[in-house]
């Protein structure tokens, strides 16, 4: 039996649209083809609700990014104001916007020592890809083009883009992908797992 038991037509359509059109990372496609997704349609503070109205503690905060909870009026007001004023602008070359410049200054004031510059990206995978790109570029500019080795821990999760997935030390997820692993050395993890 699939997970769309709710008579609510909109949610049934959502479940079907998802099943027919969304590609889900980390999905077990055999189960997914039978059951589809659980539709989380509503959130309030640190709780979310599925299509049957079942309430859950959103312990992973979306994917670690809903840090001040769902339905926060103050945040919604700021997002609305920003969208009306300037929906987006990039920071390529010599462009910026008040939001980028002022947030960078705020973050710099909170960071220790000489950590005074911010590179804006779209998520964790991009942050890791960019950090490695910058380090490689830095050493290339210093005339040390062979300084490329990256150490990563087995079982560590670093994201899903090409390099961030390669950095992710979960070997079972590498199967079938041609990931760029030549410069990566995987180290043991600081955790003892129960024997199975
Ligand atoms: C430790 C860590 N690094 C990187 C990532 C990847 O972030 P994103 O999903 O925003 O690309 C995650 C995501 O869960 C993470 O937990």
Image: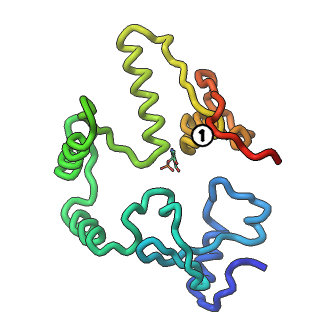
Q: Is residue 37 left or right of residue 139?
A: right
The image quarter containing residue 120 is: top left
Q: What is the residue that sits farthest to the bottom in this orientation?
A: 7
What percent of the width, then of the height, locates residue 39?
59, 74
Q: Is residue 120 left or right of residue 14?
A: left
What percent of the width, then of the height, locates residue 2?
74, 77
Q: Where is mark 1, residue-wise? A: 156
Is ligand 1 less than 8 Å from the beta carbon at label 1?
A: yes
The image quarter containing residue 45 is: bottom left
Front-most of residues 145 and 17: 145
Above or below residue 16? Residue 167 is: above
What percent of the width, then of the height, locates residue 135?
41, 24
Q: How is the image coloured?
A: rainbow
Above or below residue 4? Residue 19 is: above
What percent of the width, then of the height, locates residue 56?
56, 75
Above or below residue 92? Residue 49 is: below
Q: Which residue is drawn at 63% across and 54% down?
A: 25
Q: Residue at x 58, y 78 (%)?
A: 50
Q: In this view, does 16 lie to the left or right of 73?
A: right
Question: Helix, strand, or loop for circle 1?
Answer: loop
Q: Residue at x 42, y 34 (%)?
A: 130
Front-most of residues 20 and 161: 161
């Amino acid at each position: 039996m699939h997970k769309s038991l709710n008579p609510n037509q909109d949610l049934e359509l959502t479940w079907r649209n998802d099943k027919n059109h969304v590609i889900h990372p980390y999905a077990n496609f055999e189960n997914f083809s039978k059951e589809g997704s659980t539709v989380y349609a509503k959130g309030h503070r640190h709780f979310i609700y599925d299509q049957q109205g079942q309430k859950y503690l959103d312990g992973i905060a979306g994917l670690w990014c809903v840090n001040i909870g769902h339905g926060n009026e103050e945040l919604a007001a700021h997002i609305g104001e920003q969208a009306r004023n300037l929906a987006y602008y990039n920071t390529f070359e010599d462009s910026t916007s008040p939001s980028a410049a002022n947030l960078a200054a705020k973050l710099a004031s909170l960071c220790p020592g000489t950590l005074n510059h911010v590179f804006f990206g779209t998520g964790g995978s991009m942050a890791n890809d960019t950090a490695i790109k910058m380090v490689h570029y830095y050493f290339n500019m210093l005339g040390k083009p062979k300084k490329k080795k990256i150490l990563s821990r087995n079982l560590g999760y670093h994201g899903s883009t090409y390099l961030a997935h390669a950095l992710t030390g979960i070997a079972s997820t590498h199967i079938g992908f041609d990931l760029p692993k030549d410069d990566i050395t995987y180290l043991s993890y600081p955790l003892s797992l129960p024997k199975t």
